[in-house]
Image (cartoon, rainbow, N blue to C red):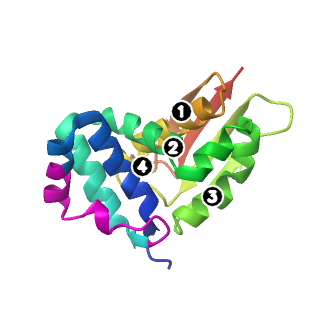
Amino acid sequence: MTDRMLRGGVLKGYFDFVLSEHGKDAWQDCILNTNINPKDLKDKDLYPEAYNIDLLTCISDQYGLEELRKVGNYTAKNLGGLAHLVRFANIKFFLRKAKESYEETFPFGKVSVLTDEFSKNASVIFKDSNVIEESCVAWLGAFEGFLEVTRTKGTVEKVKCQVKGDEYCEYKLRWE
């Protein structure tokens, strides 16, 4: 079984969101509550998923579950060079690269993207990826962020949730 790890760039994105949206005191509270120092995180290094769980839970406890949607959105739109390059692609191009990007950032679980050349919708399925509802909500916001960054008008809906007992998590994206 693969260790559940994730890239530091994601965690740094969460901390950047807290600093940007809630200020330095909130940022320091997250450091104290999680024992994670964002200054020690390296974008490409892998860190235990427990860091992700602790940080998402901390943000949710402080600001509510819906704030995690904003966290996911912010992080998706601000992932350095990737976010910049995606601005020049359409949503279908991004979705074709989603599996590879996921596996590089989160080397656990599985992601599948179901779409075809002619439709204006897609299903993104996560299996054994999300372990807490907070993570599910952050992914919902991340997909909304990817629509925004590719300048695509559309919606995202979560239709299945492994955390709540379904076989997998599924997000439906629809666009114009």
Badge 1 or badge 4: first in the primary sequence: 1
Mark closest to the chain's N terminus, 3 or 1: 3
Q: Which amino acid does label 4 sit on?
A: Gly
Local crowd at mark 3 within 10 Å, few (<14), some, or many (≥20)? some
How crowded pointer 1 is (Cα within 10 Å; few <14, some 14-19, many 20+) is rated as many
Q: Would you say the residues marked 2 and 3 are in contact, meaning their CB atoms lie under 8 Å apart?
A: no
In contact (CB < 8 Å): disc 1 and disc 2: yes
- Tell which tag, 1 or 4, sits nearer the viewer: 1
Residue picked out by circle 2: 76
Q: Which residue is drawn at 38% across and 40% down?
A: 71
**Residue drawn where x is 60% and y is 64% of the image:** 103
Q: Position of residue 110 (x, y in %)?
A: 59, 61
Residue 164 pos. (x, y %)? 39, 46
Give the residues drawn in magenta, as a range: 28-45
Q: Please name the amino acid that badge 2 sits on.
A: Ala
* Numbered disc 3: secondary structure: helix
Position of 6 with respect to 117 (left or right) is left
Amino acid tagged 1: Glu
- 30 relative to 146, above or below: below
Question: Disc 4 designates what residue?
Answer: 165
Q: What percent of the width, then of the height, locates residue 14?
A: 35, 49
Residue 92 lies in the magenta stretch: no
Disc 3/disc 1 C-alpha distance (Å): 17 Å
**Front position among marks 1 and 2:** 2
Instruction: Identify the residue under disc 3.
Output: 101
Residue 144 numbered tag: 1
Give the class, few, some or many, for how many residues have Cα within 10 Å of label 2's Cα (few <14, many ≥20).
many
CA–CA distance between discs 1 and 2? 9 Å
Q: Distance between the residues labelled 2 and 4?
A: 27 Å
